[in-house]
Amino acid sequence: MKPENQQANLLDPTRVVDFGRHRGAVSRVCALRGVFGSKHTTDISLESPKQLRRFLSLLVETGEFVLHGSNRKKAIGELLPHRSIDLVRTSGNRTAIYASTDWAEAILHALLDIKSLEGKSDALVLGYSRVGSRRWLKSSGGLLRRLLAHDKSLWSSGILYVLDRQYFYPTPDSMGEHFSLQPLRPVARVWVPANCACLVTGSCSPGVPRRIAAYTAQEIALMREVHTADE
């Protein structure tokens, strides 16, 4: 839910900047910097999945920004490094702020409802696998069954934090993931409605099957090894 005192100030950047005119990366960065400002965090609202995808694509293509998704409803003014739990890679268990240049992964973290996963042992067994240019959402157990059953209670509105990439390091064994070891003020917050979950499952267009798959037994065994090694 968006704070009442911010609703009137939410910005739709597609109405402020004609991104179609800014074809070069430098031009886009200048346009986005102008939208965001420099002293205060800009709050952005895009209700349409198509608009959101287009805006986030333009954003990460500049090479200047990374995205951090959070399902916490209360907006954060400053992000702090904290210990993360990653069952796939030990490098994902730093005390850090994690962010991505992959907008779909960031949306996943923003919209996956935290409360609906409380007490579920396989809640964190969720990730992406890429085959060529296609992205598959992968899971296992009860969470996989809920995804395949189109369980809408899995999703709720969240926030994407737009962060300056210059303060981040690339994670060596993860495409698109970056981490920062210092507190950061986001340059913008993008409020993401639950209906944009179709961007996560790959089914925003009618008649297009959802790209959801199960982790193999070998992949799950590897996750357990990583988790055990990190304990």
Image (cartoon, helix red, strand yellow):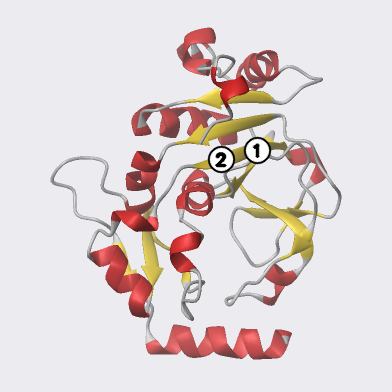
- In percent of the image, x 43 and y 89: which residue is there? 218
Disc 2 crowd rating (10 Å Cα; few below 14, some 14-19, many 20+) is many
Residue 138 appears anywhere in the view: yes
Q: Name the residue at the right extreme.
A: 182
Depicted 101 relative to depicted 142: above or below: above
Give the residue number, with chain letter if any, for mark 2: 159
Mark-to-mark CA distance, 2 and 1: 8 Å
Q: Quadrant of residue 29?
A: top right
Residue 127 appears anywhere in the view: no
x, y (%) of residue 28? 60, 19
Q: What residue type is labelled 2?
A: Ile
Contact between marks 2 and 1 (CB within 8 A): the answer is: yes
x, y (%) of residue 210? 25, 56
User: Which comes sooner in the sequence, label 2 or label 1?
Assistant: 1
Disc 1 crowd rating (10 Å Cα; few below 14, some 14-19, many 20+) is some
Callout 1 secondary element:
loop
Q: Name the residue at the left extreme.
A: 207
Quarter of the picture holding the C terminus:
bottom right
Q: Which of 25 and 59 is in front in this view?
A: 59
Q: Which of 89 and 9 is in front in this view?
A: 9
x, y (%) of residue 189? 62, 32
- In percent of the image, x 49 and y 27: which residue is there? 55
Q: In which quarter of the image is residue 87?
A: bottom right
Q: Which of 16 and 155 is in front in this view?
A: 155
- In percent of the image, x 54 and y 31: which residue is there? 2
x, y (%) of residue 138? 39, 68
Depicted 157 relative to depicted 27: above or below: below
- In percent of the image, x 52 and y 48: which residue is there? 110
Q: Which amino acid does label 1 sit on?
A: Ala
Q: In the visual, does 21 lie left or right of 80? A: left
Give the residue number, with chain letter if any, for mark 1: 75
